[in-house]
Amino acid sequence: MIQRLFTHKLLSPGDLEPSDPRMRVVGVFNPGVVEVGGRTAILARVVEQPVEERAGYFPSPRYDAGALHIDWLACDECETGDPRTLVSKTTGRVRLRFVSHLRLFWAEHSGPGYAASAVEALRILPEGPHETYGIEDPRITRIGDTYHFTYVGVSPLGVCTMLISTQDFVAFERRGVILPPDNKDVLLFPEKVGGRYAMLHRPMPSMKFAPPRVWFAESDEFTHWGGHRPVEGVSLGGAFRDRVGGSTPPIRTDRGWLVLVHGSDKQPGDGGAGVYSAGAVLLDRDEPWRVVARTAGPFMRPEHDFERRGFVDNVVFPTAAIVHNGRLDVYYGAADEHIGVCGFDLARLESACAPLEL
Ligand code: MAN
């Protein structure tokens, strides 16, 4: 663990109005964050659940052609070990207990801390067949004069990665599916690598020959990706035994690309979600599919009450990191319920990344 310089809770469900009178906001977390002309754009994932309750049934919301619907699934038909999902005992199919959309907030900086005065500017709701069960976990990268954000579309087609591009956070170009299911945690590099755009992504193999792991891919534009190769050495052992994924878009440093990664320590057969913590890796500047250094274990774990208890207990899930005068500000989802921001001394974090011999 590395000592945090500060921790602030930025946004909580009680700060938000629901998007529909039938729903209540239960989480605002996992934001894409970027600085735009002195202000901070926070593109948050907002999670809602139906207000209505029916004895013997669980509600599962979804969008169809832009309209919200609530399906009622019989309780005795569902496995409910994971607080996020309902799994059919007959078909094994998964539904979510909530539905997510994205909201853009603008925040002003205030000295070394942050004003909690984030102002809501607009909402992006699920659209089309890849987003039926919601849209989640945006990551923003500025490339040239354009901000690109990858996000997760969840639907009966699986868990896809989608892309939206904008130059002004007013007009948004939806560019559809960029990676087919199941794939998420997609981070775009802020500049070309070896003459091509580059990304990290995280396929989730369902045949279980391999655990989920981070991959590298490249492209001449933004929608067709190839040159896929695994990035070995991202996993940090037991704390990441269940899964690992990229968390924050790569930042160029003197030692290579700094990327925060997350993982869960869930044990096989364990019903819950496990403890989600974060580590850091440095990737080779020219061959970013090679890890050159990494923290020995997680440097950030659930510590504060709002990280330890919430919609999903014991989760810190970084989704954005911004450098300010030698300080790394990490924006993260806390317990799948709040947005937090905390600071680390960048030099200290980098020196905690020890060279890796593979
Ligand atoms: C998933 C992610 C996140 C979520 C964590 C913790 O792996 O997709 O959406 O924050 O689990 O529940």
Image (cartoon, helix red, strand yellow):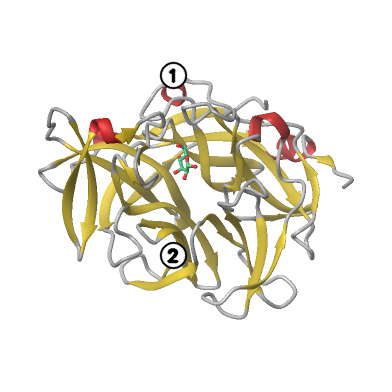
- The numbered dot on residue 305 is 1
**Label 2 crowd (10 A; few <14 / some 14-19 / many >=20):** many
Q: Dividing the picture into quarters, in which one does residue 97 lie?
A: top left
Of residues 240 and 282, the one drawn nearer to the viewer in this rendering? 240
Q: Amino acid at mark 1?
A: Asp
Pinpoint residue 66: horizontal percent, then vertical percent.
20, 63
Pinpoint residue 215: horizontal percent, then vertical percent.
66, 58
Q: Is residue 317 visible?
A: yes
5 relative to 350, above or below: above
Pinpoint residue 13: horizontal percent, then vertical percent.
28, 35
Of residues 39 and 332, the one drawn nearer to the viewer in this rendering? 332
The residue positioned 47% from the left and 37% from the top of the image is 111
Counting residues from the start of the chain, the first of labels 2 and 1 encountered is 2
300 relative to 18, above or below: above
228 relative to 271, above or below: below
**Label 1 crowd (10 A; few <14 / some 14-19 / many >=20):** few
Q: Is residue 12 visible?
A: no
Q: Dividing the picture into quarters, in which one does residue 188 lie?
A: bottom right
Secondary structure under tag 1 reads: helix
* Mark 2, residue position: 162
Q: Amino acid at mark 2?
A: Met
The quarter of the picture where the N terminus appears is top right
Q: CA distance from mark 2 to mark 1?
A: 33 Å
